[in-house]
Image (spheres, rainbow, N blue to C red):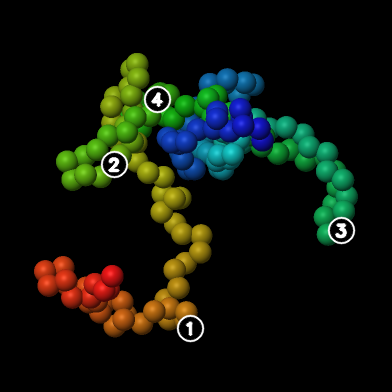
Amino acid sequence: MGWKATQKLIHHWKILRGDNVMVTRGKDRGETGMIKRVIRSQNRVIVEGKNLVKKHIKQGQGHEGGIFTVEAPLHVSNVQVLDPATGKPCKVGIKYLEDGSKVRVSRGLGASGSIIPRPEILKIRTTPRPTIVGPKDTPIDLVMEKTYDSKTGKGMPDL
């Protein structure tokens, strides 16, 4: 990827995996679906069951060849998130609540301004957190040990 292309990459993504979106351009225009995968390096998303193309796959070791129907990526500008209140496509804005939490809100013409919930699929961890202590884990008593006191300056190295 050249330097010009890297400048056009989206840095702050507002569309997440698991969002309900409407396709606004292409052969599936006007249809809705859920985002299956986000390809950030190309500014593209894969929507479940949309933008289907035939792919010729050569036979190899361990798999059969043939013609398969697969979902091709869509550019992120060709999909819009659905407003949860109205069910119409809308732009996504960011707002901070009174408690300081950051939420996505719907905005644009005809948008309700309601909060767009975070998709449930993102709350599920793909690899569970380890529950047993391993050989490289630091013991909890060493972690909780107080090594510096800001009032007395105890624990500061002599420079």
Q: Between 108 and 8, which is closer to the camera in this rendering?
A: 8
Element at badge 4?
strand
Camera sees residue 152: yes
In primary-sequence order, the first of circles 3 and 1 is 3
Q: Name the residue under label 3.
A: 61
Q: Identify the mark nearer the N-term, 1 or 2.
A: 2
Residue with the mark numbered 2: 102
Reply above or below: 115 against 29. below
Q: Which amino acid lies under the numbered mark 4 shown in the image of this protein?
A: Lys
Which mark sits nearer the N-terminus, 4 or 2? 4
Q: Nearer the viewer, mark 3 or mark 2?
A: 2
Q: Which mark lies nearer to you, 3 or 1?
A: 1
Distance (Cα) linking label 3 and label 2: 49 Å
**94 sits to left or right of 57:** left
Q: Name the residue under label 1.
A: 135
Instruction: Name the quarter where the C terminus is drawn.
Output: bottom left
**Of pointers 3 and 2, the one earlier in the residue sequence:** 3
Distance between the alpha carbons at the discs numbered 3 and 1: 40 Å
> Could you tell me which residue is drawn at 52 percent across and 39 percent down?
35
- Mark seen at residue 91: 4
